[in-house]
Amino acid sequence: MRRVAVTGIGVLSPLGASAAEVYANARAGVSGVRRIEAPFAQRLLAPIAASVVDFDPGRHVEAPRLRMLDRVSQFALVSARQALDAAGTPLAGCDLERAGVFVGTGMGGSLSNDEGYACLYGEGSDRIKPYTVLLGMHNAPAAWISLEQGLRGPSLSYSTACSSSAVAIGEAWLRIAGGSLDLAVAGGAEAPLSLGSLKAWEALRTLATVDAAEPAASCKPFAADRSGMVLGEGAAMLVLEPWERALARGATLYGEVLGYGLSTDIAHITRPSVEGQAAAMRAALRSAGIGPADIDMINAHGTATPANDSVETAAIKAVFGERAPRIPISATKALHGHLLGAAGALECVLSLLALRHATALPTMHLRAPDPSCDLDYVPNQAREGVAARTAMSNSFAFGGTNAVLVLGRGG
């Protein structure tokens, strides 16, 4: 197995439109959760979301192509360009048949599908957009990246709900580590903030209520007064390549992917289990060839739902035993919301940047501790000077697919 370097990062998220901006806001505890200003906001019980602001797709995509791109594909294209630009010239001298794209998305072109249904059923019209299929299909983000960059290797899309992009990164890592690919663009994209999507999530009773005093603080992972998750949108992409190739071409090294673990909860389609989450963490450690004593920080799945946070706490204890209370654990969804299929990629990016800057990112809005969630969640303020070499990033999902990445600072 070859070492796999991360040489490029691209991000469009509620916390900003670059890796530097996203990291700075996460470190400072700046929330991207906002009140929804859309005309349909009054139809929502909790009109809040973590949205990407000031994004003008016309600045990034020419008009003829833009008609075929749902917002999810727009995000994917722009973040992939950022990642490749940050990687320098990774495609120079690369056999493009050995370069692939791996993208996770939970809901695909949700906005375009919602618009089509509103026209068809709401307005009673038979005239929907001619590109609706292309706009809405789940593999559109990966396909557009491959087309734009000329990458002729595998173009694969993963839809495992909230673990989709962690799976995408892990599967890309396997192929580069195993020698079948020399470069991959891997990550996730999601744009789920349509009325239909928001009402569907609302019906599941998993969304947070609005914090009346501070709407931006409505997502409260691991807190006693947590009430649920806040939906978010955006994309995060990584450029992965063999470590030796990256060194040879003088690339910036943002860190490395060390391992990847999967497990499946089989008891219930939405209810997590300690056993399932712990199994994925153990599998990731085995894949990385390290033990529980070697993990220095954790980015938790941390959705702020009552069920997940207590189960994840117990699963971390099951894996790390007596060390569990001494590991800094960050739950960054408090700030950027739950990007569903793109969440794992964004949290992977934040984990890599936290390692690079020797900082444990804060779990914000944790003012009322929950006795069942009694680990070190780095409450409300970043912790500087953390001498961490490795990080674990957890992604757990409806449907039961648990995915965990183990990351290294590199060097």
Image: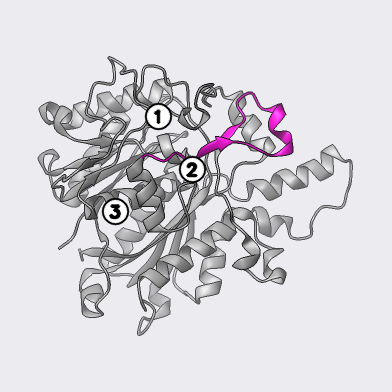
SS label for mark 3: helix
User: On the rendered image, what quadrant is the N terminus found in?
Assistant: bottom left
Residue 122 sits in which quadrant? top right
Q: Position of residue 306 (x, y in %)?
A: 41, 20
Q: Please state which amino acid type lies under the numbered disc 2.
A: Leu
Toward the viewer: 103 or 82?
A: 82
Residue 343 sits in which quadrant? top left
Toward the viewer: 237 or 129?
A: 237
Q: Which residues are magenta?
A: 29-48
Residue 273 visible within the image: no
- Colour pattern: one colour
Which residue, given by chain and number where applicable, does mark 1 sit on? 266
Residue 276 sits in which quadrant? top left
Which residue, given by chain and number where applicable, does mark 2 sit on? 339
Query: Residue at left 63%, top 50%?
Result: 109
Which residue, given by chain and number where applicable, does mark 3 sit on? 353
SS label for mark 2: loop
Q: Position of residue 324 (x, y in %)?
A: 17, 30
SS label for mark 1: loop
Q: Nearer the viewer, mark 2 or mark 1?
A: 2
Q: Is residue 254 above or below residue 212?
A: below
Q: CA distance from mark 2 to mark 3?
A: 18 Å
